[in-house]
Image (tube, rainbow, N blue to C red):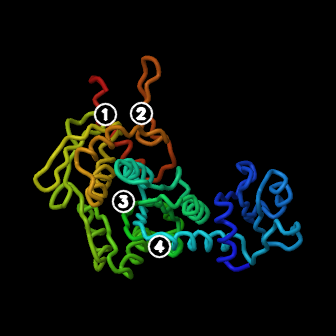
Amino acid sequence: MQIADLYNIYKQYPSVQTDTRKLKSGDIFFALKGPNFNGNSFAKAALEAGAAYVVIGEKEFEISEKTILVDDVLTALQQLANHHRKQFSIPFIAITGSNGKTTTKELIHTVLSEKYKVYTTEGNLNNHIGIPLTLLKIKRDAEIAVIEMGANHLLEIESYCRIAEPTHGLITNCGKAHLEGFGSIEGVRKGKGELFDYLKTKDDAVAFIMQDYDYLQTMSKDISKIITYGTQDAHVTGHSGNNATLLNVHVEIENTNTEIKTQLVGDYNLPNVLAAVAVGDAFNISLNEIKSAIEKYVPSNSRSQLVETGSNKIILDAYNANPSSMKLAIENFEHIDTTKKF
């Protein structure tokens, strides 16, 4: 079956699932195969659970006209997602980096939602399966899409760019993450930099750059448009204030400035907040609207949270870590003045 034909079926049943435990009536089930499981063996169960169609990769699991046989189920899923992406002429913002991807994504989503209908990666579905599923959830009313991309080896981000075809890109940073796959910090920069390499091939592409990181300036050279944020000499500048547990950020854009009182723990979130401000400003959201959006954002994903339980206050920063992020979290905790009210 051609992808265009599969897309016609998807338009009739625009909900895709790869896990029978989450299957709803009318979904299309993609029977993925991995080293420890074979989704093809769940084809019958998926149909009995209400799946409209099951996409399989092994002929022995065919069941009447409700199964669609393809050469490779994952490839079909990714090609379908790319075909769907091509139906849109809206901005697609891709975010990658070693630390802060998800928080930055959530802040950007919150800011852009002040003015636009935004579709964003759910949770951390940022891999070879999650990115296609994210794209296939984008509906016709979309005005902007925000796609998080994770990677632990070279050529991974490059492959995601071919699927999502971003128009805008942001690399939060390049730190000591997944060195077993990238081999070195230089490997990390090369791998994450595949996003900027993709943007360099596109007219009118836009990159958002943390000006404080010299390596990002180098990596983004030759991209059509660069928008900078940082602590100085940037379009959006800012710094953290008063050493409070919850991050306060003084932000300035040209001759306008404001104080943003976030509900995020840790000065290490300063670049994430400034990135969201820069993206919001680029899409014509006023600084007052940006401030309001960020101040309303409450982290709920075990990242940079302050949790109160009775008389106790807990700093919850327990989601997946790497040496760079752990170092920042420990340094932040060391600087907290526990004699002051949080």
**Mark 4 falls on what kind of element?**
loop
Compared to 79, does 287 lie above or below?
Answer: above
State the separation of the CA atoms marked 3 and 4: 19 Å
| Placement of the C terminus among the 4 image quadrants | top left
- Quadrant of the image occupied by residue 61: bottom right
The amino acid type, in three-letter code, at marker 3 is Thr
Q: What residue is at 84 percent from the left and 61 percent from the top?
A: 41
Instruction: Identify residue type, mark 1.
Output: Thr
Q: Which residue is mark 3?
A: 172
Which one is in front, 235 or 332?
Answer: 235
Residue type at the position of mark 2:
Ile
- Give the mark, 1 or 4, whose residue is nearer the N terminus: 4
Tag 1 or tag 3, which sits nearer the N-term? Answer: 3
Q: Mark 2 and mark 4: span between their CA atoms?
A: 37 Å
> Would residue 34 be seen by someone viewing this image from the given angle?
no
* 24 relative to 138 in the view: left or right: right
Q: Give the residue furthest to the top.
A: 311
Residue drawn at (70%, 49%) of the image? 22
Report if the CB atoms under discs 1 and 2 are less than 8 Å apart. yes
The image quadrant that residue 295 belongs to is top left
Indicate which label's residue lies in the foreground, 3 or 4.
4
The residue at which mark 4 appears reads as 165
- Identify the residue under disc 1: 245
Tell me which numbered mark, 2 or 4, is placed earlier along the sequence: 4
**Badge nearest the viewer, 2 or 3:** 3
